[in-house]
Amino acid sequence: MSFSQFRFSQLDPLPKIDNVQLGNTIGQGSFAIVKLASLKNQTFAIKFIHRQMCLRRGLSDDEIAREVLLHRHCSGHPNVIKVLHHGADTNWLFIAMELATGGDLFDKIEPDVGVDEVVSQFYFKQMISAIEFCHKQGVAHRDIKPENILLDSRGNLKLTDFGLAAVFMKKSGAKRLCYTPCGSPPYMAPEVVDRNGYDPAKADIWSLGAVLYVLLAGETPWEEPSMHDPDFRKFAESGGKVLSGAWARFSPPVLSLLRLLMRPNVEERGTIDRAMNHIWVVRDNILAAPDGTCKDPMLLTTKLFENLHIGLSDEAFHQSSQAERYDSMVDQNNYPMSQPVADIAAMMDDGDPVDIMLRQLPATQQAYTERSKPRADLSEMENIIKIVSSDPALLQFSTDKKAAIAKLSMDAFQMNSAERLTRFFSVLDLQDLVEILMTSLTRMGVQCSYNFDEENIPDDMKLGTKGSLQISVVLRDRRKMYLRGCIKVSRVQNLRLKKVEFFKTTGDPLEWRRFFKRTTVLSREAVYVDKSEEP
């Protein structure tokens, strides 16, 4: 049984750590849970790994501890999430880590579009620098993919999750092969499935190329690196000289680097040193300070926002309606995981079961009613406009990016303000909003654990005790990989304004954004946008 199916209250109590205050759950996976934590005004994340759940999956304490040790061994690089502390009790192992307040990098990348070469090169240099450092410690990551790439508050890349990492080189310099296939198919090297073993460091180099491709294109080059995949077969048979699709959009230097990193023949594949000295990589970057960190977070955030767009036109609605339905016929007891613990990627409130929660609001949060005074109506709408217009997520719906960006405050361009852009606002009554969301999910073939019936929801339905309502979803994306998360509706302050947020707990963040975007377009009548811009 999967850890993520348990109510938090059904598990053994978490260990008490001296003077540490635990907050919300921000990640959850097969047998791990990640929570916000604070100590003396310092905020960080703690990953709790349930020992019995691991043992049932055949993982010993020593194997789990290996993740902690290898991650800590690689924590000395600025682009690797730092391990702050670790420990255990009879039920749990825990790892206290640096908190990546900027969220997922790939949450901010438009599917099928990607980002420009300036942003791509900035992040690639940070990513390859982190991997070079790990390799010098004798450690191969073996699971380089969008899920494991986070951002700090200034937009710097942070590599995380060493659950599949392996020691491939001893201090003497002697190297060894690995024999366990692992990773996510679109990002793994073709030799990883070879029973004769593979060099994990060379496999990491291939994965760097695959991630760079996704940065530039907003999609994966193939579903899996095998001759059964037509896209990969075309790439392999042409010696990497594919000039159609997204490949046709790349500049010659980018193509040269990708072909160096992703050579199917391991002996011909480029080394880390060769890649770091490639003509495209050594270029100066306007975003980078001399030490490689971001020197202009506002410019970086602006450039990330430029390509993000959600069209609410009739044409966009028709395209979303006609797109292939998701496959939601999944076995929630046994869906696969490519790593033994969850990514730090989403937030869910403790105690919420995996369906829609309906509870009473606190007395201080009164629902808006038609009996409110007109004067209050005007004041409320002014507050709504102020709140929505200051949220960077609104830029996704703008047709005039430059004008919309100019309206935002400097604070909106801090990366932690843009931690998660998979959200929209609505002023509809809750019943109407939920009905629209559920209709959109049903139209896409997404099955939820709650059978929605509008007649069963009372007219005076309120949001939950924490001002929130949650819909849990599990589906398979276009690549037949699993996505798990929830749609959370929460009341904003004391207003009739609701924030609808899509929180991912498992899966590719780019595919999750694709799911969010499609759901939003199909729910367009519920979306509140800048009235000065018509979609």
Image: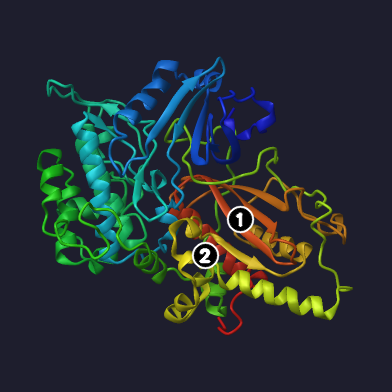
Q: Is residue 133 left or right of residue 340?
A: left
Q: Position of residue 180 (x, y in %)?
A: 31, 27
Mark 2–mark 1 Cα distance, whole angstroms, equals 11 Å
Q: Position of residue 145 (x, y in %)?
A: 35, 45
- Residue 357: assigned label: none
Q: Is residue 148 left or right of residue 168?
A: right
Query: Which kind of residue does numbered mark 1 sit on?
Result: Gly
Residue ranking furthest to the front: 40
Q: Is residue 82 left or right of residue 36?
A: left
Residue named by callout 1: 445
Q: Quadrant of the N terminus?
A: top right
Query: Which kind of residue does numbered mark 2 sit on?
Result: Ala
Instruction: Determine the image quadrant of residue 457.
Output: bottom right
Q: Nearer the viewer, residue 425 or 110?
A: 425
Q: Say which label, 2 or 1, has the lower sequence index.
A: 2
Q: Position of residue 385 (x, y in %)?
A: 64, 75
Q: Is residue 59 above or below residue 401?
A: above
Residue named by callout 2: 323
In this orientation, does residue 332 appear?
A: no
Instruction: Determine the image quadrant of residue 296.
Output: bottom left
